[in-house]
Amino acid sequence: MPKAKDINSRENSRKSSFILFLKKGYKEVTIINIMEATKLSKGAIYHYFKSKEEIYFATLETYYFNLMSTAGNEESSGNFREDIKRLYEFAVELFDQVENITEEGLDYPIRSFFSYQLESEKIDVVRENIHNTVLNYRGTVEKIVSNGIKNGQVRKDLEPKIIALRIISILEGLAIHHSTVKRNVKKELGPKYKAIFKDFLNTTCIQ
């Protein structure tokens, strides 16, 4: 059974490495950078991870796949408006967590997170996993829309797959459009998501 000290050191190494990957990108980060950030020797780092690539995969597991899987596995509450609110609040919280992952705050969190994801997609096995994660998330959104139609909350003349893509496009599009926001992402994105989805719901829901 792993010791508590080993678990903490491994988790701290993962977090510190994730911050480096966000700031510099995978290719630019070196083991020396990781040693300096974690205050661990090379031997200690290799005790927890076999390589820089393995560290990178560990950060993806924690800070991308686990988070997106949680969002993708959420069950519909049966209230379409509340489910939509939950979706955009998740997006806001995600970028807020990225911004506040360091004590001093990380600049340009949206840009950093999307760059991290896009760089990861260059790796074949990671690209496949990201693709499957995206499909699972899209399926969750489609299910929310389908349940909204079934429950009489959403117009029956609408196609769930198309509406789901519209929702995802709003979520990702607004975030990308604000990739130049340096700080206070939550303050910037929250009200705008609320306003845009209010208009979306007015044209999608049965009043």
Image: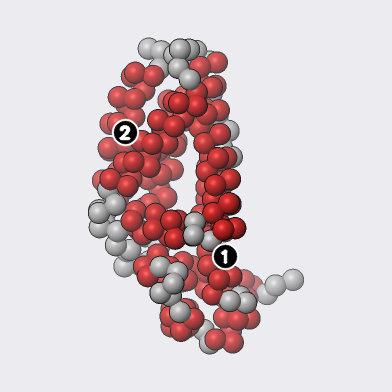
**Residue 82 at x, y = what percent?**
44, 28
Could you tell me if residue 187 is visible in this image? no
Residue depicted at x 70% and y 72%: 2
| Secondary element type, mark 1 | helix
Which amino acid, by three-letter code, is at mark 1?
Ala
Q: Residues within 10 Å of mark 2 (few under 14, many from 20)?
A: some
Could you tell me if residue 122 is visible in this image? yes
Give above or below for 59 relative to 190: below
**Residue 184 at x, y = what percent?**
27, 53
Question: What number is the disc on residue 28?
Answer: none
Total marks drawn?
A: 2
| Left/right of residue 34 with respect to residue 172 in the rendered view | right
* Mark earlier in primary sequence (2, 1): 1
Residue with the mark numbered 2: 194
Give above or below for 155 relative to 176: above
Which quadrant is the N terminus positioned in? bottom right
Residue depicted at x 34% and y 41%: 173
Residue with the mark numbered 1: 58
Which quadrant is the C terminus positioned in? top left
Camera-side residue: 109 or 121?
Answer: 121
Which amino acid, by three-letter code, is at mark 2?
Lys
Residue depicted at x 51% and y 17%: 149
Camera-side residue: 55 or 103?
Answer: 55
| Secondary element type, mark 2 | helix
Q: Quadrant of residue 167?
A: top left
**Residue 83 at x, y = what percent?**
47, 30
